[in-house]
Amino acid sequence: MYWVWMLIVSLIAGIIFGPLARLILPGKQNISLGWTILGGGIGAFIGGLIAKALGVKDTSGPDWTQYLIQVICAVIVVAVIAGYQSRSRSTV
């Protein structure tokens, strides 16, 4: 049940972390809002796994380090999606 809950929370976090990742990335990303949210959700999920593996997730109060790791992962995932989208559009 933990994994299902983590997936749901990651997709909700993608609503915040996806657009935040696009703000952090330099330049223009030609990807839709749906891809932005999905990329943010995937990044949040991967970042949550990394934070759990590092033991960061087991703190009292807000987990700022976990959020930072999730935002960094979201930036990476959104950058990969944007790069893939731009390459697929330029070859068509």
Image: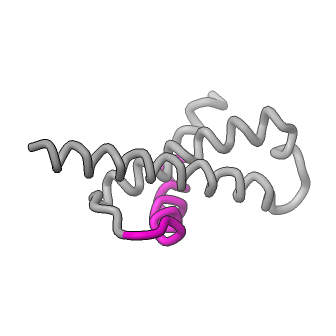
User: Residue 30 placed where, x, y %?
Assistant: 27, 61
Quarter location, residue 53: top right
At horizontal 25% and vertical 45% (from top left) the residue drawn is: 87
For this view, does 84 lie left or right of residue 65? left
For this view, does 73 lie left or right of residue 79? right
User: Residue 78 placed where, x, y %?
Assistant: 44, 52
User: Residue 57 placed where, x, y %?
Assistant: 81, 45
Relative to 33, residue 57 above or below:
above
What colouring does the structure picture have? one colour
Relative to 85, residue 24 above or below:
below
Q: Which residue lies furthest to the left in this view?
A: 92
For this view, does 11 lie left or right of residue 72? left
Relative to 13, residue 80 above or below:
above
Magenta residues: mostly which secondary structure?
A: helix
At horizontal 89% and vertical 50% (from top left) the residue drawn is: 59
For this view, does 17 lie left or right of residue 68? left
At horizontal 40% and vertical 70% (from top left) the residue drawn is: 27
Q: How many labels does the image show?
A: 0
Quarter location, residue 92: top left
Q: Which of 24 and 62 is in front in this view?
A: 24
Q: Which of 44 and 76 is in front in this view?
A: 76
Residue 30 on the magenta segment: no
Quarter that holds the N terminus: top right
Please state the extent of the stretch shown in magenta in the rendering: 9-27
Q: Nearer the viewer, residue 10 or 19?
A: 19
Q: Which residue lies furthest to the right in this view?
A: 60
Relative to 37, residue 91 above or below:
above
At horizontal 61% and vertical 39% (from top left) the residue drawn is: 46
Residue 17 on the magenta segment: yes
User: Residue 4 placed where, x, y %?
Assistant: 56, 32
